[in-house]
Image (tube, helix red, strand yellow):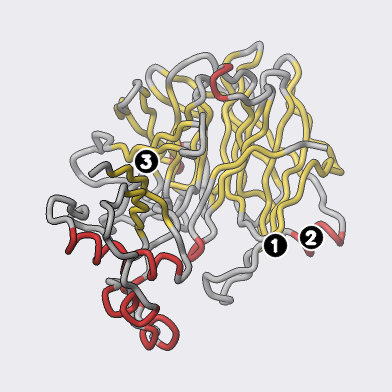
Amino acid sequence: MLVVAAVFTFSSRVAIIAAGALKWFQHSCPLFTLPEHSTGATVLLAFVAVPPGTSSLPITRDTAFESSPMLSEEKEDGGDDDDDFQPVQLLKDISGLAYMGDGTFIGVHDAKLREPLPRVSMFRLPTSLGGIKYMSMKPNWPEDRSSNDLESAARIPGTRQVLLCESGDDASELDRIYLAEVGRRSIHIKEHIRWSSFAKAYNVEASAVALTDSGHLFLWAERNSTTIHWRDLQLSPLAIGARGVSSGSGTFELSRDQRHLCDRPVVGLDVDSDGAIYAACSHDIEGEGDFGPYRSGVFRIGRIQADQVKIDQQPTAMTFQDGFKVEAVARADEVPDKFVTKAPMTFIATDDENYGGTLRPVIMT
């Protein structure tokens, strides 16, 4: 007997009827077996050379339902048991994002001090329907404690190094900035400093690093403020504002409509290779729970030329996202061809709380 089989997935009662037919076929042909963990949602459609004199499949709708391993109608239609549902995605949040220049990103998560949750991940752009790939990283945190509330990540231009920045925790002792070296599949903490060594940090969700004529520059902003601060950055040993070469601040203003859109004016920062400064904002009212709906936007807020930082008084709105709570923006000046993404490209990352998180390219108007 010749049997040709193919596997298909259905979400209708066609699957139920076919499953009943398959039960009959198993009984008639003992050598034909089902996969060990098959369910009624997986149907093996068999095209069989039936010997002469064999009757057609003795199947009715009732016998099909009796033999189906699918949920009963009562549970399918009236049950409220979440055990039968699977998460749509495993990624829960991205609080900060840094593009590493090869189609990969380093992302941080805002796990609190004693929470057994991921803190740093590596993301790779999709090349197929398989989607975004990610890998949870395990940095060598200092012996006294792991990270607390990482809210931003900033790549050091031209290197494989990133700054992983805690929020500051209302100017408490939990206010570290970690310098890390990123490998192909690893991340190594080299050293760390505290925000309090150069500034008071209450709830910083945005940071970036730029390369200027005078050296590296570290930029940051508090979540609820439209003021951008900057200080000179030294990498060996790690220090911010130690040389006093460049320090300052600048403030932009949101229009009334923009303020209505973004009650959190700066939740992400990045500087591209041309010196343009980008900021992400979001709408997430405290006390409204973690179910949204959210709104977000990305603005161009200024430029760095030579060693001068200029913050525009009126930012330029570039793109808006309804339904998402953006917490990071990252500019990609170059993207390898295999990722089929035209560069330069702007990427956003979201922390949509109970709706999870994601990473997406966006069109800048």
Residue extending farthest top: 213
Task: Please report whichever mark, 2 or 3, sits nearer to the chain's N-terminal start.
Answer: 3
Q: In terms of depth relative to the viewer, which is nearer, 98 or 254?
A: 98
Q: What residue is disc 3 on?
A: 120
Q: Residue at x 70, y 62 (%)?
A: 263
Q: Relative to residue 137, is residue 318 drawn left or right?
A: right
Image quarter where the N terminus lies is top left
Residue 173 visible in the displayed image:
no
Task: Give the structural element (helix, strand or loop) at label 2.
Answer: helix
* Above or below 244: residue 313: below
Q: Are marks 2 and 1 in contact (CB under 8 Å)?
A: yes
Q: CA distance from mark 2 to mark 3?
A: 31 Å
Residue 8 pos. (x, y %): 41, 51
Distance from label 2 to label 1 (Cα)?
6 Å
> Quarter-wise, where is residue 229 in the image?
top right
Query: Are the residues at dot 2 and dot 3 in contact (C-beta closer than 8 Å)?
Result: no
Q: Amino acid at mark 1?
A: Asp
Characterize the local packing of mark 1: few (<14), some (14-19) or many (20 or more) Cα atoms within 10 angstroms.
Answer: some
Q: Position of residue 193 (x, y in %)?
A: 38, 34
User: Would you name the residue on which mark 2 appears?
Assistant: 259
Vertical order, 86 against 226 (above or below): below
Determine contact: label 3, label 1, CB under 8 Å: no
Q: Amino acid at mark 3?
A: Val
Residue 238 image offset from top left, x and y in percent: 40, 24
Discs 2/3, front? 3
Mark 1 highlights which residue? 263
Q: Nearer the viewer, residue 211 or 36?
A: 36
Residue 206 at what x, y percent from top left?
Answer: 58, 43
